[in-house]
Amino acid sequence: MTQRAEDRSHLAYWRRNLRYVIGLLAIWGLVSFGAGIVFADALDGVRIPGTGFPLGFWFAQQGAIYVFVVLIFVYVFLMNRLDREFDVDERDEEDAP
């Protein structure tokens, strides 16, 4: 592969990585700030079945944390797939199934 093709591949890799990060951070921001603060009063009209807790309160206290943890797993999945696509994964040939 020529140096120019490597540079384009490297740039494409980081552009996609930044797209993933920005998208996931936007989701996290909307959930934590939007559902937990801005729309909390509107969401409080809905009660979580079986608990009686208002939905806005739940998002502010726990929901945003759960979403953040799920987004971490989504990021790991996306980056592993991206690493394999650009052949920069860290697995040895011996470790591959």
Image: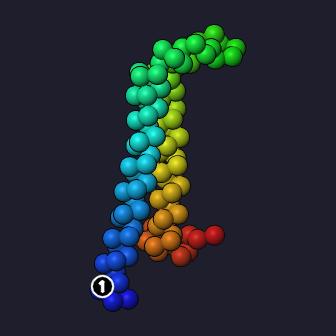
Out of 71 and 29, give the one closest to the viewer: 29
Tell me: residue 80, above or below residue 34.
Answer: below
Residue 41 appears anywhere in the view: yes
2 displayed left or right of 53: left
Residue 61 appears anywhere in the view: no
Out of 92 and 15, give the one closest to the viewer: 15
Circle 1 residue = 4
Tell me the residue at 39%/51% (across/down): 21
Tell me the residue at 41%/22% (across/down): 38
Measuring from the top left, give residue 23's x and y in whole percent: 43, 48
Out of 92 and 83, give the one closest to the viewer: 83
Tell me: residue 12, above or below residue 72.
Answer: below
Tell me: residue 67, above or below residue 82.
Answer: above
Measuring from the top left, give residue 84's x and y in whole percent: 51, 69
Measuring from the top left, give residue 44's x and y in whole percent: 54, 14
In this figure, what is the number of numbered marks?
1
Q: Which residue lies furthest to the front in this view?
A: 42
Tell me: residue 17, above or below residue 26.
Answer: below
Question: Where's the C terminus, which quadrant?
Answer: bottom right
Find numbered disc 1 in the image and state the secondary structure of the residue it sits on. helix
Question: Where's the N terminus, which quadrant?
Answer: bottom left
Tell me the residue at 47%/18% (across/down): 40
Tell me the residue at 47%/32% (across/down): 31
Q: Dot 1: few (<14), some (14–19), or many (≥20) neighbours within 10 Å?
A: few
Q: Residue furthest top?
A: 52
| Quarter of the figure with residue 17 | bottom left
Q: Which amino acid does label 1 sit on?
A: Arg
Measuring from the top left, give residue 24's x and y in whole percent: 44, 46
